[in-house]
Amino acid sequence: MTDVDHSVDVFKNQCKFMVRGLRRCRNTATVNTEEQLCSYHDPATQLTHMKNTENPTRISSSHKRMTRPDSVIQPPEKILPFKQTSLPVILDIGCARGLWLEHLQQKFKNDFNYIGVELREELITVATTRNHSKENIQFRCMNCQKPSHWCSLLNLKFGQLDQHVQKLENRTKKSNVRIIEGKKVAIMDRPVYNAEFFMKSLQSTGITVICIQFPDPWAKSRHRKRRLVDDGFVTMLHNVVRLWNHQSEESFIYLSSDREDLHDEMVQVFSKNEKYKCIGYRISGHPFQIGTERDLVCEHLHREVYRSIFKML
Ligand SMILES: C[S@@+](CC[C@H](N)C(=O)[O-])C[C@H]1O[C@@H](n2cnc3c(N)ncnc32)[C@H](O)[C@@H]1O
């Protein structure tokens, strides 16, 4: 038998929260280093939809479950014009509680405007509450697979096309995605008529970086259609960014995943589309040198993270 070294703290870096008073939480990614608590159990970052209000550190387990993309029905409120409209935008798709954007804002301050979009409303509530005093961060709850949600976010009105849009969306017909040059821009096969109005209200130089970090994998093949990145999504993203980038700023897409197969699947989908060019495949390290919550978990578990960068042409 080998001797056990009792001087070694086996709980080093592990969250100190006692689950049901019986065992320590197994999460090793602590966000509150002073009290050594992970993001789920740190009161400062905890979620708002707790089942047990008497015990504020007890969080409903429902938030840990993945939300079906089609479960979000309400389109988001439009993005309000930023105070410094000339700044480029960092858009975080699937931003969860927005902690990464928050850290980015602390590092880069007013170099960018920051937008976080996320499927789960309770996470957006936390993100918005934590950042309500900052002028250059906005969060919205939306399903990024839905063109109508992007239009709502960008304040594009479908007008009489509404019913038509709904029918098309129900059919989720992705083959007819196309771009119409000039003022009319089509997302799926719906022309959007008041792009100019949108430009005036937003007046931004354009999105510069779009981050898709650790999108839910939906591993089972029968759930494949729930995966965020597919042919329809990347074409739609190009259309959305074209609307935003009215001054022809360059845009980059940063992808990451700890699942090699999922990362390569995303890379394949973007590579297949002639509107994107891969400029970095399996790059080492986060380009902003600030990891997301999931990055931190992977770091502590010594899990490899696969990262790639695309340029939008
Ligand atoms: C695994 S988490 C990663 C969170 C964060 N990006 C990180 O790296 O820590 C994936 C997030 O993407 C969100 N998401 C998945 N599909 C989405 C969709 N269609 N629209 C918006 N958000 C989505 C999920 O709700 C979830 O919060």
Image: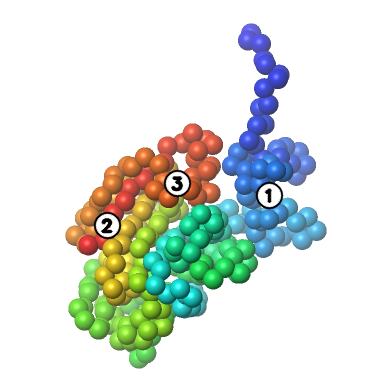
Relative to 115, is 258 above or below? above
| Residue 268 in sight from this viewpoint | no
Nearer to me, 145 or 252: 252
Nearer to me, 285 or 247: 247
**In the rendered structure, which amino acid carries the disc numbered 1?**
His
Q: Quadrant of residue 18?
A: top right
| Disc 2 to disc 3, C-alpha distance | 19 Å
| Residue 15 in sight from this viewpoint | yes
Q: Is disc 2 in contact with disc 1, using a CB cutoff of under 8 Å?
A: no
Q: Quadrant of residue 166?
A: bottom left
> How far from the left and from the top, in percent, is residue 169?
36, 75
Relative to 285, is 234 above or below? below
Q: Secondary structure at mark 1?
A: loop
Q: Which residue is mark 3?
A: 289
Q: Which residue is mark 2?
A: 311
**In the rendered structure, which amino acid carries the disc numbered 3?**
Gln
Label 2 within 8 A of ligand 1 by Cβ: no
Question: Residue drawn 48% across and 64% down?
Answer: 110
Which tag, 2 or 1, sits closer to the chain's start?
1
Which tag, 1 or 3, sits closer to the chain's start?
1
> How far from the left and from the top, in percent, is residue 60?
67, 56
Q: Which residue is mark 1?
A: 41
Q: Quadrant of residue 8?
A: top right
Is the residue marked by circle 2 packed among few (<14), some (14-19), or many (20+) residues within 10 Å?
A: some
208 lies left or right of 119: left
Q: Nearer the viewer, mark 1 or mark 3?
A: 3
150 lies left or right of 71: left
Question: Residue drawn 37% across and 40% down?
Answer: 284
Q: Secondary structure at mark 3?
A: loop
Is the residue marked by circle 3 packed among few (<14), some (14-19), or many (20+) residues within 10 Å?
A: few
